[in-house]
Amino acid sequence: MLQDAALRERAARVIPGGLWGHLRVQGLPPGYPQFFQRAQGCRLWDVDGREFIDFMCSWGPVVLGHHDPDVQAAAEAQAKLGDAMNGPAPVLVELAEHFTGLVAHADWSLFAKNGTDATTICVTTARAATGRRKLLVAQGAYHGAAPWCTPYPAGTTAEDRAHLIHYRYNDLDSLAQAAAAAGDDLAGVMVSPFRHDYGVDLELPTPAFAQAVRALCDRQGAALILDEVRTGARLDLAGSWERFSVRPDLSAWSKAIANGHALAAVTGNDRYRDAAASIFVTGSFWCGAVAMAAALATLRKLQAVDGIAHMRAMGQRLREGLAEQAAAHGFRIRQSGPPQMPLVLFDDDPGAELGTRFCALALAQGVYLHPKHNMFLSVAHRPQDIDDALQATDRAFAALAAQR
Ligand code: PMP
C-alpha cells in the first residue's frame, strides 16, 4: 500500500474527517497526495517520493521558497536564544519598526499567529474605535474561519454574523446600498486588495471602486480594513492599494510575511492606535520570537532581491507558456489575477471538470497546480523551473486533448 493511503487510513481513525480545513485533499483532483515528506525551494516531495514543482506554496506562506537558507538561519539563531518566554524578545520591536516603516499607511503594528486573528483584530479595533457595530464585507470573500466570517456556518449562529452587510466587489451601487443599510452604525468596510473568491475569475479592483471605499469610510468615520492576508508581500510591500493611492486605516497580514513560519500582523494608522491599545487580544504563542526573526529576514530579503518583481516575471512566463500551449492543443482558457497569484480556468467548464482533469494530468507529470483556487509563485521559482513546469503542462494538455 502507498504511504499516503496508509497515513490517510490511520488519520481517519484518530482525526475527525481525516483532516480539518482547507488542506484536506478531498477538495483536490484525484491523485493528489494528502501527506508530504519534505520541501525545498519550489519543489516538494510527497510521502511516496513523488516530486512536484509547487505552484501553491503552502497556499501562500512560502514566498522565498521552502527552507530559504537566510530565513532558516535567522530563525535558528533566535531559537538558540529563546522563543516562547515570559515576554517578547527584542526582535519584536525591531520587527514592528521595520514593518511599520515598510507599510505606507502604518503608524503601528502588532502581531498574532493566523490570518483569522488579524482580520478579527481589525474588526474588533474598528468597533472599539467607533463604538459602532456594522461591518460591510464583499459577497463570497474569504476573511477567515472564525464564526463571524467562516463560509461554512456549521456550528455557528446567525447572531455571529448579525452585523455583517454584504456588497458586491467593484460595484459602487451595491456598496452605497450596503452603507445605507448600515446607517449611522457603520464601524468599517472590509475589502480584499483584489477579488480572489474561490472558483471564479480573479478580478482586480477598479480605481473608482478603491477610491469609493475610501471616500465612504471618510464620510462615515468608519475604518477601511484591507485584508492583505493572501496578497501581502506578493503584490507590493508598501501595501497592495498603494498603486491606487488609497490607504486603509487597518490592514490584516499573515501567510507570506514570515516565509512559512506562523505569524500574522495588524497594521494601523494613528486614528486607530488608542482603540488597538484598548482591546484585549492575545495568545500563548503570539510573542514567539522565532517567527518574528523569520519575518524580519523574509521582509528584508524580499526587498533586497526585489522578490515581487521576480515573482511577477515568473508568473508572466508561466502565463504566456500556458496560453500558447492551450491554443496549440485547442483549448480555450482564461488566466486571471496578478501573474504572481494566477488562476487558470477553462471556458465552458462551469463545474471545473476539465480544469480538474487537466490538474490531475499535470500532477502526474510532476506539477502541483490548483483548479479553482488562485495559485502562488515564489522567489525560488527560477526561469528553468517554469520551463520544466511548462514541458510537463504541455504533456498534460496533450493527454487532455487525447481524452476528447
Ligand atoms: N483572509 C484571507 C484573504 C485569506 O486568504 C485567509 C486564508 N486563506 C485568511 C484571511 C485567514 O487566514 P488563516 O487561515 O491564516 O487564519
Image: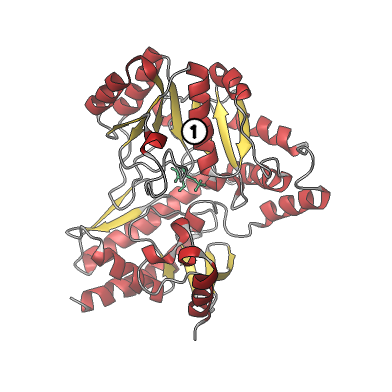
Q: Residue at x 35, y 18 (%)?
A: 216
Under mark 1, the amino acid is Gly
Looking at the image, is 359 positioned above or below residue 137?
A: below
Q: Residue at x 49, y 24 (%)?
A: 126
Dot 1 beta carbon under 8 Å from ligand 1: no
Q: Is residue 237 visible?
A: no
Q: Is residue 375 left or right of residue 260?
A: left
Q: Position of residue 212 (x, y in %)?
A: 32, 22
Q: Is residue 202 left or right of residue 5?
A: left
Looking at the image, is 220 positioned above or below residue 61?
A: above
Q: Nearer the viewer, residue 283 or 332?
A: 283
Q: Nearer the viewer, residue 139 or 73?
A: 139
Q: Is residue 376 left or right of residue 76?
A: left
The residue most toward the right is 81
Q: Is residue 302 visible?
A: yes
Query: Quick one: SS at disc 1?
Result: loop
Quarter of the figure that contains the C terminus: bottom left
How has the structure been colored for display? secondary structure
Q: Nearer the viewer, residue 42 or 15?
A: 15
Q: Position of residue 176 (x, y in %)?
A: 26, 22
Residue at the disc numbered 1: 239
Q: Position of residue 47 (x, y in %)?
A: 55, 75
Q: Residue at x 34, y 53 (%)?
A: 343
The residue most toward the bottom is 1
Dividing the picture into quadrants, the one containing residue 173 is top left
Q: Residue at x 41, y 50 (%)?
A: 341
Q: Residues within 10 Å of mark 1 (few under 14, many from 20)?
A: many
Q: Position of residue 39 (x, y in %)?
A: 58, 66
Dividing the picture into quadrants, the one containing residue 213 is top left
